[in-house]
Image (spheres, rainbow, N blue to C red):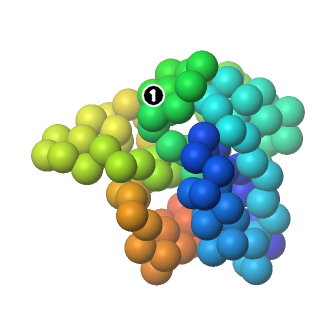
Amino acid sequence: MARLLIVEDNPLNLELFTQMLEDDHTIESATDGAAGVAAAIASVPELILMDISMPRLDGFQAVALLRAEKKTQAIPVIAVTAHAIRGDRERILASGFDAYVSKPIDEDLLKEAIDRLLKARR
């Protein structure tokens, strides 16, 4: 079981992602970007799922901080976001995310992205 950190400000989405993944992974969570960065530095999870639009620090700011921190720079981060217009995927990946999954979430696509990134990391 891999340790995943889910950074999501919407309680319903956080609960949904947790339910999707808790049978196969140990789940930690944070409800904003600043708390997510702090949690990642403190616990160094194997993978992070991160929303883009959040209070305090958005996903772009949070992933930039994670990439600048030695303890967290190599952790795969998946953007899980409603930003799904043309060009968003490319912009998100160029900003430091390792993968992109748009909301509403396709559970199979999310799990495939998680598995692929965890295998690549090991």
Residue tagged by mark 1? 60
Residue 39 placement: quadrant: top right
Q: Farthest residue toward the left?
A: 86
Residue drawn at point x = 46 percent, y = 52 percent: 80
**Which quadrant: the C terminus?**
bottom right
In the displayed structure, 46 sits above or below 95; it is: below
**Which quadrant: the N terminus?**
bottom right
Mark 1 element type:
helix
x%, y% of residue 92?
34, 38
x%, y% of residue 55?
56, 25
Seen from the viewer's position, the closer of residues 18 and 61 is: 18
Residue drawn at point x = 79 percent, y = 52 percent: 28
1 with respect to 97 (left or right): right
In the displayed structure, 86 sits above or below 40; it is: below
Residue drawn at point x = 24 percent, y = 41 percent: 88
x%, y% of residue 105?
43, 66
Instruction: Please tell me how many numbered marks the rendered image carries.
Output: 1
Seen from the viewer's position, the closer of residues 55 and 94 is: 55
Residue 15 placement: quadrant: bottom right
> In the rendered structure, which amino acid carries the disc numbered 1?
Phe
102 with respect to 34 (left or right): left
Residue drawn at point x = 48 percent, y = 69 percent: 110
